[in-house]
Every structure is written in C-alpha cells, then in structure tokens.
Amino acid sequence: MGLALELAGIPLANPVMLASGTCGYGQELAGVMAVETLGAIVTKAITASPRFGNPTPRLAETPAGMLNAIGLANVGVEAFIADKLPYLRDLAPRVIVNIAGSRIEEYVAVAERLETATGIDAYELNISCPNVAHGGIAFGADPAAIAAVVGAVKRVITRPLIVKMSPNVTDIVSTSRAAEDAGADALALINTLIGMAVDVSRRRPVLANLTGGLSGPAIRPVGLAMVYKVFTAVRIPIIGLGGIMETEDALAYLMCGARAVQIGTATFINPDAAVRIITGLAAWCDDQGVDDLQDIVGACHL
Amino acid sequence: MGLALELAGIPLANPVMLASGTCGYGQELAGVMAVETLGAIVTKAITASPRFGNPTPRLAETPAGMLNAIGLANVGVEAFIADKLPYLRDLAPRVIVNIAGSRIEEYVAVAERLETATGIDAYELNISCPNVAHGGIAFGADPAAIAAVVGAVKRVITRPLIVKMSPNVTDIVSTSRAAEDAGADALALINTLIGMAVDVSRRRPVLANLTGGLSGPAIRPVGLAMVYKVFTAVRIPIIGLGGIMETEDALAYLMCGARAVQIGTATFINPDAAVRIITGLAAWCDDQGVDDLQDIVGACHL
Amino acid sequence: MTEPCQPPSAQQMMATVVANQACGPGIHLLELTCAAALPAIAPGQFAFLRPRHGDIFLRRPLGVHEAEGTRLRLLFDVVGRGTAALAAVQPGQELDLLLPLGHPFEIPPPPALPVLVAGGLGLPPLHFLARQLHAAQRPFRMLYGARTAARLVLADDLAALCPQLRLFTDDGSAGEHAQITAGLADLPPQAHLLVCGPTPMMRAVASAAAQAGLACQVSLEERMACGLGVCMGCVCRTRNADGQEGRARVCVEGPVFPAQEVLWDSP
Amino acid sequence: MTEPCQPPSAQQMMATVVANQACGPGIHLLELTCAAALPAIAPGQFAFLRPRHGDIFLRRPLGVHEAEGTRLRLLFDVVGRGTAALAAVQPGQELDLLLPLGHPFEIPPPPALPVLVAGGLGLPPLHFLARQLHAAQRPFRMLYGARTAARLVLADDLAALCPQLRLFTDDGSAGEHAQITAGLADLPPQAHLLVCGPTPMMRAVASAAAQAGLACQVSLEERMACGLGVCMGCVCRTRNADGQEGRARVCVEGPVFPAQEVLWDSP
Ligand SMILES: Cc1cc2nc3c(=O)[nH]c(=O)nc-3n(C[C@H](O)[C@H](O)[C@H](O)COP(=O)(O)OP(=O)(O)OC[C@H]3O[C@@H](n4cnc5c(N)ncnc54)[C@H](O)[C@@H]3O)c2cc1C
Ligand SMILES: Cc1cc2nc3c(=O)[nH]c(=O)nc-3n(C[C@H](O)[C@H](O)[C@H](O)COP(=O)(O)OP(=O)(O)OC[C@H]3O[C@@H](n4cnc5c(N)ncnc54)[C@H](O)[C@@H]3O)c2cc1C
Ligand SMILES: Cc1cc2nc3c(=O)[nH]c(=O)nc-3n(C[C@H](O)[C@H](O)[C@H](O)COP(=O)(O)O)c2cc1C
Ligand SMILES: Cc1cc2nc3c(=O)[nH]c(=O)nc-3n(C[C@H](O)[C@H](O)[C@H](O)COP(=O)(O)O)c2cc1C
Ligand code: FES
Ligand code: FES
C-alpha cells in the first residue's frame, strides 16, 4: 500500500522514524529490529563538543511513561562524523541529525560542520530539551529566540530543517509560527514535558537532575492536541510524536494533521515497535481501502 | 498523629481535600465514602448562571489518565446557595467553593453573591479551566490578566482566596507570582493539561469538544515539577494536586512543597481513595516517627 | 428526575472470575464470585468495574445480568479496549466492582402489561427482569432483536421464561426478518414498554410508543467516569413536563428514564 | 570498553510462569518456560523483562540465574514497584523477555584462580558461573555474604558446587560474623575476583583487590530504560588506562567491567 511520501523535500519509504535520543546512532538496534524498513532515523542530539550528560540516576518510571534527564550526552560532532555517520549513511532509512546547543553560535557551528559531511538527509533542531541548564528550553519557549536560532541555522545549511518544538509553552501556535516564519521546512511536535518523580522513602527527587523530560503514552493526549492545533496554523508539514506505542496511535497523529511520526519510548518497551507500526499501517490501508496513507492526514479536521 | 494544619487561615483536620469537579457538591459521595474524615471539599465550579456544559461525549480514557470536557456544567450560584450549600455546611469538612466565569465581572458577581451566604470557608478561583471558549484558560496564562481577576475578586471578599493555576503555561513561576502579588492567600497546582483523543475507527476526535483536560496519574510528574518549582518562588502555601492515587503520591507532593493535597480522578477509580490516603498518611507518620506531617513539607528541597 | 438525588449507597467489592465464556461473536458471559453477599439489585441497575490488574484506567458500566448470593453474571459485547480487557480475564483473576448503581426499571403495576424490548446487548437488564416477572407469575411479553442469528444469544433461555417471546434479526437468519419496531404494531393499550438496546433502536421504539400512546421506559448509554453522579460527564438531554430542556446524569438519574423525558439527538 | 560496540542480538520472547516461590524474606525464585529454546547465555548477562499485563511500564533487568533449553530461572529481591509486580505474577501468567543482554563475566584462563564474591542478591550470575566452573571441573573459590541467615539463600546448593565456599553475615546469624572483605585476606596472588553485590560492597572489594594487586571484575547496577545502549540512561563513570574519565553504558559495555576501569562515586 502507499506508505511512501515526500516530506519537506525528503523522500521517505514510509512515515515512520525513530525519535532522537531513543535509537542512539542506529547501530545498536540493528541486532533487534529490521532497521532497513524504517522511513528515517533521527540521531541522538549532537553538540559541538562531546558531553557526558547529567549524573545518574537519570531515568525514572512514571505512570504510563518515564522521565529522562540524560542531559544531551553525546559523542560530539567530530566523533559523530568520524565514527557514527559512516554506519548510518549505508543504511536504507533517511538520516536526520538532531542538533542541540547552549548558544546560537553552537547550533550554527554544529550545522556548519555537518554540512561538510555526506550522507545526511536533513537536520532536526532540538530547541526544546528540558534537561540542560543553559539554552535548550529557553530557545523553545520564546518566539523571538526561536526565530533567531532557526534563522541563523538556516543561513548556513542547504539541507531541509525540521524544528522540534517544546510542549512546555503557553501557546504552541505562536512558537510554531515563529519557526515557520524563520524558515523551518517542517516541525516535529512534541518533545518531552517537564516532570519530576520523588523517592518517598528517601524524601528526595529520584533524578539527580531533580526534573526530567516526561515521555511515553502518558503524554500522547498532549501531543495529539498540539499537532491538531498547529496543523491549521502553519503550512509546513508536521511530524507527530509523543507516546506512540501502536499503529492506532500513529494513525491518531496522522488524523490530527501529522504527515509522519516518530517512535520514541515505545522502542524501549518493544525494540521492534516501529517495525510493527509500519506493518500495521500497511495492513490498515489495505483493510480500509486507503491507497495513499497521506490521504488521511488531518482527517479529524473535517 | 499530627495531620492537622492551618492553611491560609483555614483550620483543617488534615491536608486532604476532594478536588473541584470530582466530588459534585459533596452529597453524592456520602453513600460510598466517609466524607466526615476529609479535610475539605472543593465544590464543582460555580458560575453566575446555570450551565449545561458541553455536548457529549465529554469523557475519554487515556493511558493512566482521562480527558474531560465537561465545560463547567453547574447549577449556578443561586441554586448552589439554595439547594447545595445547606447540605455541605453541615458536614465536618471545610467547604471551599470553586468559582469560574468567562469575564472578570462574572467572577466578581459570583464571589459577591457567595459572600452573602454562610457556611463557606474559602474560595478557589478557577482561572485555568481549559474547556470553555471564553475566559478560563486565557486568564490562567497571562500574569496581567491573573492580577486583574485575582485583585478584583479579592476586593469583594473577606474569606481566604485560593487561586488554581493552569499547567498549560511556559512559566508557572511568573503566573504564580502574579496571583500571589494580587493577593492570593494560597495556590492550588495543577489543573488539567490540554489533551486530545482520537477515535481512529471513526477518524474523529473522541470528544465532541475536540480537546479536553487531562487528569490522573499520567500528569503527576508535571504537577510535582510545578509544585517543586513554585515552592521556592512564593511565600503563600501551595495545595498540590494532579494524579494523586495513593498515600505515597500525596507524600511526594508534600515533599515537593505542598502543604495540602487534593484528590481528583482517584475518586472515580476508588470512591474512598481520599479516605484511604488520610489513613495512610497517619500510618506513615506513625511508622516514620513524624509528629507533625507539615514537617516534611518541602523535604525534597533540602 | 427532578426529585432531589439520593446519595447512592453502592458497595465496592472484589470478585473472582469463575468463568468467562464466548457465547456469540465477540459476546462474553462473565461469571463472578463476589467477596461478600451482593446487596439487593434491581433490573436496570449496573455494575461499574475494572480488572484489578491491567492497563484499563476507568471503570466500565455493565448492566447486571444475574445476581444471587455472591454470584454475579454479566453479559457483554467487545467494542473497544475496556471490553476487550474484560474478555481477556481468566478464571481466578480479580475484578474490582462498584454496585449497584443507577436508577432501575420501574415495574408498572397491573393492569399494565410489561413488554420487554431488547436490542442486542441491551439484553442483560431485561433478561434479569424477565426472570423476575416469570418468578412472580406476572404476564409479560418480550421482543428481542439482533443483527444476525449468532448474536441473538440466550434466546432459548428467554423462550422458557416468556412464551410470548418474539425474535427479530436484521438479516432474517433467525426469527422475523424485520426491525424490532415491527413487533410494536399489535400491542394492547395497557402495554408498558421497557427498552434497552442501541440508541437508534431505542429512539425508534420511543417514537413509535409515543405515537401509539404507550408508556415507555428506556435505558440510556453514556461514557462514564465516576458512576456516582459527581463528574457530570454522562449527561443526556432531557425535557420536563413543561417542555423545558435540561440535563440528567445517566449514572444516577438514569440509566432508565421515562422515554418522554429524553431529548434524542438528531440521528 | 573502548572497542567499538557490537550490536546486541537479543531476542524478544514470551515466557510462561511455572512457579514463583518466596525463598527468603522478600526474595523470590521465578521459574519460566520460554516460548522458544533460549539462545546461548553467559553468566553475568541479564534478562530485561516485564509482566505482559499490568501497570509496570519499563522493563526491569535481572541477572540470569539458570538457563537450559526453554527453562529460565531468575532470583530477585522485592525492592520497589517493579519487583513487587514480578513477585505477584502467578503460574500461567506471561512475561515479556528480552535476552541475553550485556557483557558477561570474562572467565580468566588458568592458572588464574576464579574467586566468586557474591553479596546478597548479587548471587544469580555467580551461582550460574559456579555451576559452569563445577561442570568444567575447574577449581574455584566462593565467598557469599548477606545481612542475615534468612537472606543467605541457596547456600546449600552452593556448598555442593564449591567445597571452598565461605559464608558471611552482617549479624553473625550464619557463617562468619564479618564483612565479606574479610574473606579476601588470604587469597593467593593468582586469585581473580568476580564480584556482584550491592555497590558499597563492590567498591570495598574492588579497593581491597587493587591494594592486594588482584585482578577483579565487578557487575554494576544502574536504572535502565532500553537495555540496548540507545537511551544513554544507565551510564557509569569510568577511567581508561591513561586515567582519563569517561562514561560507559552498564547495559552494553557492562554490566561486568574490569574493576580498575570503574570510577566509584564517593560513598
Ligand atoms: C448503564 C449501562 C449499562 C451497560 N450495560 C452493558 C451490558 O450489559 N453489556 C454490554 O455489552 N454493554 C453494556 N453497556 C455498554 C458498555 O458500557 C460499553 O460498551 C463499554 O463501556 C465500552 O468500553 P470499551 O472500552 O470497550 O469501548 P471504548 O473503546 O471506550 O469505545 C468503543 C465504542 O463504544 C462506545 N462507547 C464507549 N463507552 C460507552 C458507553 N458508556 N456508552 C455508550 N457507548 C459507549 C464508544 O463511543 C465507541 O464507539 C452499558 C452501558 C451503560 C451506560
Ligand atoms: C544487570 C543487572 C542485573 C540485575 N540482576 C538482579 C538480580 O538478579 N536480582 C535482583 O534482585 N536484582 C537484580 N538487579 C537489580 C534490579 O534490576 C532492581 O532491583 C530492580 O530493577 C528494581 O526495580 P523496582 O521497580 O522494584 O524498584 P524501584 O522502585 O525502581 O527502586 C527501588 C530501589 O531500587 C533502586 N533501583 C531501582 N532500579 C535499580 C537498578 N537498575 N539498579 C540499581 N538500583 C536500582 C532504586 O534506586 C530504589 O532505591 C539487577 C540490576 C542490573 C542492572
Ligand atoms: C531517553 C530519551 C532521550 C532523548 N533525547 C533526545 C534528544 O537528544 N533530542 C531530542 O530532540 N529529543 C530527545 N528525546 C525526546 C524524544 O525524541 C521524544 O520527543 C519524546 O520522548 C516523546 O516521544 P515518545 O513519547 O515517543 O518517547 C529523548 C527522549 C528520551 C526518552
Ligand atoms: C471530570 C472533571 C471535572 C473537573 N472540573 C473542575 C472544575 O469545575 N473546576 C476546577 O477548578 N477543576 C476541575 N477539574 C480539575 C480537577 O480539580 C484537578 O485539578 C485535575 O483533575 C487534576 O487532578 P487529578 O489528576 O487528581 O484529577 C475537573 C477534573 C475532572 C476530571
Ligand atoms: S459518570 Fe460521573 S456523573 Fe455520571
Ligand atoms: S539502558 Fe539505555 S543505554 Fe543502557
């Protein structure tokens, strides 16, 4: 059935991607899932220099979800290009590199360096990571700051730019429009919500970082509502994510207005969740007589 | 053990209240729980005129939570005083009346009318209901609007005022401070998150109102993080709520900085959830050698 | 509906699954032993339940099909996640029950002739009522319809209780090949309809009853969160004797309403 | 640790609970039949699992205690929600497993003398290893300590495998009334310690081993989300041969590390 699409100029075999931070740099999952069937892989956030991230514990379970406070642990852009990209480049799925930073200059520097490498299909600008002290969330909440960082990165790149939005805002429409107006080619909604867990027996926060990012099915209603709202407010395509565990959840995002979806936390529960969803989407199209899955995008708006 | 406290001048036998919208006007629960053991009951939002609320379906289940789009259905302030308050007044728990409106004048009118009635211990200003088209959320997100509505209501009342905050904001600290500066005697954190659910088989939103308010354990990490953050930013007491199902969850809120808690959705799952939590808090104090439960308020900040 | 609401005095209790059998396509008969003797339950009242362990969050309402001592039987159709979870519970597993809830059918005193009208999985409260009427040796009639023969479950049971039973299927695979409303044509004026089934069917029956001037009670369905009347989630549109519009909670003022008080949404 | 990471080739499979028995205070021995024959598993590798139905979201790591054919045994201590949920699973219920994961103990070739050091619920991988060494008729020693006699589970089994077994309890209720580190005093220089237990105990053993110049491997614990090396949640602090600080993932580079590579957090 017709799962293929073109999104912001990127041709995708199907609309299912692995979300940033939940699939490393692709390699580790090859042993447990059919990575070649994916539409795209979005890498863990890449920063200018390598980062160890936050102290542990940096994970906690919550009802129908989890908190992470990884703190952008990554190998840094140089090691990424030298050690991780060659593997990714040879895989069938499109390669989308998630870029993070603590200042506009850092985002720009990472983007400039990545431009010199081959085998990258698009960038995803992470302006919404709640787990770093500087930058991160600050960029993601203020339309003017979003415009500045998106504009600055756009000026140094030739590849399509996806901007990943924070849900921790009063008005997702104004932040999304700011990204669009500054040149974003697509939006990814949503990153994690800010959350906390308490170890009552120790009378302390569970996470060393105190707060973390909430992901998993618990946040799906929030992600769906934001995609639904932004769909009618922007012209660029939306990639929906947040709590997608099954085929039905992916379809819900498409019906709210997402053209593609990303699978994050679900991979931790079932390593082949994304593959099952691709199969499930094809089966659904078959069953429902839908020729092109893109035909149901935004169906909830009718 | 010492569960009693005084909160914003209101003496409470214990820090456990039933949350607005989840206990009606008290009467219906008397047959299924020991209402007399509660610290306080917070009524369903009261508006100037009776309201039917939104069309059905106005409920949906979500992972570890639920969506509601009741739309402030209530009997109106006159019928409340005539038919509902007499019953509430005679109960042991403190009576807190949740006030809603679509304009500042409506909040003020309801508050003025309630001032003439006896048997009310405090008001809770609902500036955060996501399910009404006008007012509601608009007030809850903008510090200036919060200051205006809180200030206007404060001028016409003599009883303590709790302001119930919306979590659907970029900066909960600035909205909370605005409420405090305008005269709030306490804050209740958090109301529901905006969310949505899709009926994939019908390709339509589940709720007639499209979006609704997300409650239940799914949102507990968000509530805890906000209480934790606001605790150090304001001097007035905080009432914590959002996803409290068990004694441990209530303790987590206290440790983050709440002096009291409200039980909402949990009552739907176990009608006597609040009673079990009161018993559980007493047992915990006993077990841990805590003389006054208020001693653990904010313990996570140490 | 306008009388002041009595606080419901439902009990919360655990029940252990004794048997959980498919008795039609997607239709399950669930037999439970409750931890304590069941309180008095009237036909039309419902149990509000969820599996003790599992990933269903809210309770689901199911009409009581049969209750005696500590034995409880429920009959349900798998239509979504909640009922699928109930269909999967195994003997030995536990359910958490809250019951009895809701306002039951009001049995009209003689000379009224009770006419039970069940559409598909609207059967449980009416099967319950049929047993009561049969035990009381009270004459009554019954109409029972479903999409197809396989979904016309427990029809033999009913025939034993009600010699006047008429069966209907949409596809003619059993009983009369007609809509259940066809069974209303030749009823005597003292007929009092007691109806439970899909909303479109109830609307059609209620409208036929109104035209024929017959008394009619209907058991409505709405999504519920609390089952106790506190969340205001399960309302239906009503009209009082003066024709004034209102809202009533299906979980406390209902699920059974006098048909003339219900304002049906347009089909 | 510095070699390029091999993609793990774990299998996901369902397993049915055969027995779930308490064998000490809060300690459970869980016996499973897997849906397929188990792949090769080495001592120190772990299973990443969760009950198929229930309200646990993330999988939990448990060291493999015994694996043969389709039979899998796990031994665990109830410390929180996840392990409480595992303690509650009944025979017939299903678990969802991902295994084998992680880097196992590396068995040092002769003339090294393997010395297995197990603290409390650090036993499973070392019990597994003891059985392998015994079967291979390889001489080894074992030290096993716990808080109290009741928690020194399966000590008889171990005694049968290892005549040189020494037992320790914190309260002297069984074996030697001493910390397990007391057992390190008289080891020969070819002793190679293979350690699993609570972090403070492992830190103490590692430091004693370093001082005595003995080789030592430790099996670390961290909270895990993916178990596959992709979430970066389960890192420990490491130092390489040049003394440079780094981070390694307990789920793929570990859980077993050469003790000298581990940078312990201050106690
Ligand atoms: C008082 C009462 C008694 C009932 N008795 C029975 C019974 O004896 N046997 C039986 O099979 N069913 C009965 N029902 C209906 C039953 O409660 C629903 O089928 C069930 O709650 C659906 O849950 P789900 O999670 O499987 O479906 P969902 O996934 O929630 O929904 C699936 C479909 O069912 C619809 N639906 C869900 N909940 C309700 C509801 N409460 N009312 C109407 N439609 C709903 C949805 O709109 C959707 O189309 C009764 C309902 C009420 C209110
Ligand atoms: C590779 C590996 C193998 C293991 N093998 C075994 C085994 O064979 N038997 C056994 O009993 N336990 C074993 N554990 C520990 C076990 O995984 C944890 O006890 C379990 O995950 C706790 O889950 P919970 O939900 O019950 O506890 P939680 O409620 O999550 O936490 C309770 C307490 O345990 C601590 N904790 C939670 N998870 C971990 C973790 N992964 N590592 C360290 N501390 C943790 C918390 O900080 C807290 O103090 C192993 C851990 C690892 C990493
Ligand atoms: C462990 C973990 C690490 C993450 N790291 C990143 C990251 O580096 N960059 C990013 O943009 N998002 C990151 N995310 C957010 C996810 O990509 C995704 O937006 C979020 O988890 C919601 O989707 P989900 O519910 O499907 O997991 C991370 C999420 C998790 C759980
Ligand atoms: C059905 C329902 C109706 C509600 N109505 C109100 C209301 O009228 N006024 C208000 O301030 N909050 C209302 N709330 C929000 C709750 O009081 C509470 O803030 C929220 O549900 C989070 O707490 P919980 O997770 O414990 O339910 C309502 C919540 C639910 C579920
Ligand atoms: S279900 Fe809550 S009022 Fe009826
Ligand atoms: S648990 Fe995810 S990297 Fe180890």
Image (tube, coloured by chain):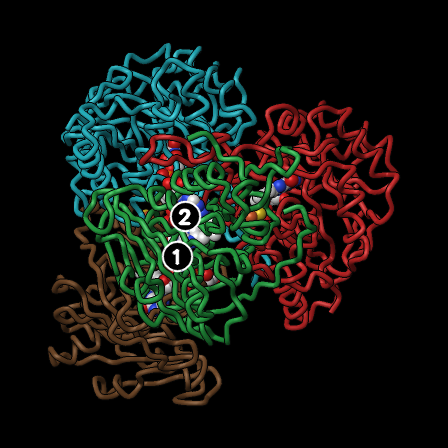
Chain colours: A red, B cyan, C brown, D green
Ligand 1 - quadrant of the structure image: bottom left
What number is the disc on residue C98? none
User: Are the residues at dot 2 and dot 1 in contact (C-beta closer than 8 Å)?
Assistant: yes
Chain ID, mark 2? D
Q: Quadrant of residue A158?
A: top right
Amino acid beneath label 1 = Arg
C117 versus A90 height, above or below: below
**Image point 32% across, 80% down: which residue?**
C143
* Relative horizontal placement of residue A262, taking residue A195 as reference (left or right): right
Q: Is residue A299 above or below residue B23?
A: below
**Mark 2: secondary structure:** loop
> Which secondary structure, mark 1?
strand
Q: Residue at x 18, y 34 (%)?
A: B282
Residue drawn at the location 41% of the way across and 61% of the way down: D51
Q: CA distance from mark 2 to mark 1?
A: 10 Å
Judge from the rendering whether residue A191 lies leftward or rightward of residue D60; answer left or right. right
Query: Can residue A190 be seen here?
Result: no
| Residue C224 placement (x, y as % from top left) | 36, 53
Quarter of the image with the C terminus of chain D is top left
Tell me, for residue D187, which label it has, or none. Answer: 2
Q: Position of residue D147 (x, y in %)?
A: 26, 45
Measuring from the top left, give residue A76's x and y in whole percent: 73, 36
Q: Amino acid at mark 2?
A: Leu
Which label was assigned to residue D141? 1
* Foreground pick, D87 / C182: D87
Depth check: give the residue in front, D5 or C53.
D5
